[in-house]
Amino acid sequence: MPEGHTLFRLAREQQAAFAGREVHVTSPQGRFAGQAELIDGRVLDGVSSYGKHLFASFGPDVVHVHLGLYGTFNAGTGLPPVPRGALRMRWEGPGVDGTGVWTDLRGATACDLINEGEVQLILDRLGPDPLRKKSDPDRAFARISRSRTAIGALLMDQAVLAGVGNVYRAELLFRHRLSPFRSGRDVDAGSWARMWADLVTLMKAGVRAGRIVTTRPEDRDRRRGVAGRTDAHYVYRRTGLPCRVCGTEVRTQVMVGRNLFWCPTCQAL
């Protein structure tokens, strides 16, 4: 599932391509057709993200998108390709230089036209987003510090923390040598403050790079240059491989419906 940095980057790209101009909105698949007609030809005011949610404002009407596990946006310039398959929503616009831009949405869990009140209801049920400047980490810690639930599960709870998914969960816990099975109430305030600051840094880097890289240069196969495909992560999807720090075999098990990865030595309970 795309994590918060992906949605933040998408919002920024769509803002640059379409905001302030009229947008031709269609639903070749038909599932969004009635709602598309209501905003077709209207000016897009702006696009923003919060956690794993994307919001595109056309006056009082807002297109809300949650990509879920299988949703994807594709984009390009010039004439868009002939619509094929389950194409939920297509935007077309003149672009900044008038040459034409388009974006296609497929496979999203949610693609709905809602109002500003409904947007607020969604935001009210989400925890702080590390990519939002005014997010309050203490709000997340207030829930974490009272909970007997494992921190590995709490980090995936969007009501606790918005935008964190399976990759950031596994990698953040490893970077702070924290067992994913430790209860939230056993995570102290100092540890959480360091984790939050690190998460902000990692997710901002993910926005810039368009990918998640969590390894430090000294722990990579090559200590110079950017991380490659095989050394971008410490434990995520490295089941059975040696830990990059201690050499212990990385383990996995399912936690809150997703595969959890950790080093039993570096992250001892």
Image (cartoon, rainbow, N blue to C red):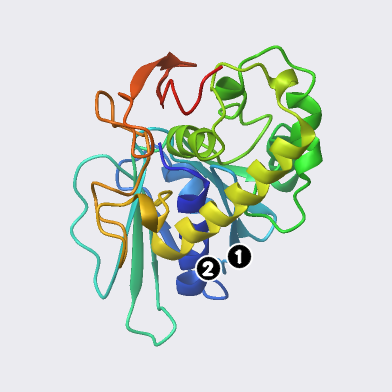
Q: Which residue does the numbered mark 1 point to in the structure image?
A: 46
Residue at disc 2, secondary structure:
helix
Position of residue 35 relative to residue 45, above or below, is above
Question: Which residue appears at 75% of the width and 42% of the height?
Answer: 120
The quarter holding residue 141 reads: top right
- The image position of residue 223, as x and y in percent, is 31, 61
Q: Residue furthest front?
A: 246
Specify the label residue 15 is tagged with.
Answer: 2
27 or 252: nearer the viewer: 252
- Find the distance from the CA under tag 1 to the CA under tag 2: 6 Å
**Left or right: 103 with respect to 5?**
left
Q: Position of residue 253 (x, y in %)?
A: 38, 14
269, above or below 245, in the image? above
Q: Earlier in the sequence, mark 1 or mark 2?
A: 2
Q: Is residue 268 visible?
A: yes
The single residue placed furthest to the bottom in the displayed view is 97
Question: Can residue 41 be seen?
Answer: no
Residue sitting at x 59%, y 47%: 199
Horizontal side of residue 226 vs 258, given as left or right: left
The quarter of the picture where the C terminus appears is top right
- Name the foreground residue: 219 vs 43: 219
Q: Which mark is residue 3?
A: none
Percent position of residue 159, x then y: 68, 29
Q: 131 or 12: nearer the eye?
A: 131
Q: Is residue 213 above or below residue 177?
A: below
Relative to residue 101, is residue 67 drawn left or right? right
Q: For the residues labelled 1 and 2, say whether their Cβ atoms are less than 8 Å apart.
A: yes
